[in-house]
Image (cartoon, rainbow, N blue to C red):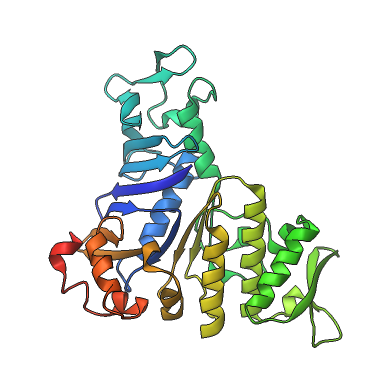
Amino acid sequence: MKLVNLSYLDPYWELSNLQLSDMNLIVAKNATGKTRTLLTIDLLVKMITQKKNLNWGSRWTVDFVNHQNQSISFEFATKYQDEGIVTAEKISIDGKQVLFRHHKQGTVVLKNFVTQKEDTIYPPNNKLTLHVNRDVRKYPYLEDLINWAEQCYGFKFGNISPYSKFSEQEYDLLTAVEDIPNLFKSLQKESIAKIISDFNSLGYNVSEISSKDLPYTVLYVKESQLNKALPHYKLSQGMFRTLAILVYIEYLTIRKKPAMVIIDDFCEGLDYDRARKLGKLVFEKCKNTAIQLVVTSNDSFLMDTIDIQYWNILQRNGKVITCLNQQNSPNVFKKFRLTGLSNFDLFSSDFLLQTPNETK
């Protein structure tokens, strides 16, 4: 299942109609709301998986497309009180309502796909229905939402370090699986050969990558020009970050399970050539897979590489954040392509200001 639309409102800020496709590059000027947008997705995931309570005083409208190509719309609202109170909740499939919460009555009426009738339940007012009522046959739409949240991963590119696991990062963005050496150890020879080939296509010259179980798992990278393989903690930061991303994407690809992957400040700290090549490679590898890729960056090298069809440009007016992309403003993007300017100019120039009527 993939997230295709997200709107969020609280007393302090509003994210209006963030549209996502299979692959996405989110760009925004400083203090526009890029980090807040990522943290909103993070909050949604953690509220569904009960890693955070509902005490946020917020209103959500979230649209998904599941593996059956059905449109699932999930709307709910909460208010500040103890661990949070659910004041509204509704789920629709292809426009037909299958769940509705009667807040004052304390009841939820939801469609049972086994009996094809409506069930009435009385959930706690500080829990969403999917927190307390799971049955994969009766209520598959609830399971779709939970499975989506459980398959969301995220991390900040600049925090990738050979000295720490993804899951131990202080940066609070979604969750990550095991550390890179253990992910690598789980891969088959064919996958390792792909990683080495991809690594070398980025300008490295590596003949072998292997792992050893010491007190903890260590990767050894053998460069063709060197006599000895280097342990992963002696690689440069840029080299290890690049290797980590390749291992991570390969691992998720071979699992063939739907997953959302968010990489914040993608390619941060890499030189021009590597940033350009790695960005292009990762987008190509995720194309036509079960991975929904969402990366953020203000790196001009990366922007010039990633086709603007994948762009989401965030714009801010007071507390309201809106999104400009090829889906909601096709004429703007078509007109820009005819200018012959570089991709980065769409972000950095006054082109968008010169076409105000078309960006609505």
Q: Is residue 314 left or right of residue 240?
A: left
Q: Residue furthest left?
A: 357
Residue pictured at 22% horizontal, 76% vertical: 351
**Position of 101 relative to 80 (above/below):** above
Q: Is residue 255 left or right of residue 304?
A: right
Residue pictured at 53% horizontal, 80% vertical: 269
Residue 293 spot, x, y in % from top left: 49, 57
Q: Quadrant of residue 195?
A: bottom right
Q: Residue furthest front?
A: 338
Residue 352 spot, x, y in % from top left: 21, 72
Q: Quadrant of residue 64?
A: top left
**Position of 25 relative to 200 (above/below):** above
**Position of 142 relative to 157 (above/below):** above
Q: Is residue 263 left or right of residue 91?
A: right
Q: Is residue 342 visible?
A: yes
Quadrant assignment for the C terminus: bottom left
Residue 316 spot, x, y in % from top left: 24, 64
In depth, the one of 261 and 337 nearer the eye is 337
Residue 339 spot, x, y in % from top left: 26, 78
Residue pictured at 80% horizontal, 88% vertical: 225
Residue pictured at 41% horizontal, 58% vertical: 38
Q: Quadrant of residue 186?
A: bottom right
**Position of 251 relative to 44 (above/below):** below
Number of dots carrying numbers: 0
Q: Is residue 271 visible?
A: no
Q: Is residue 87 left or right of residue 220?
A: left
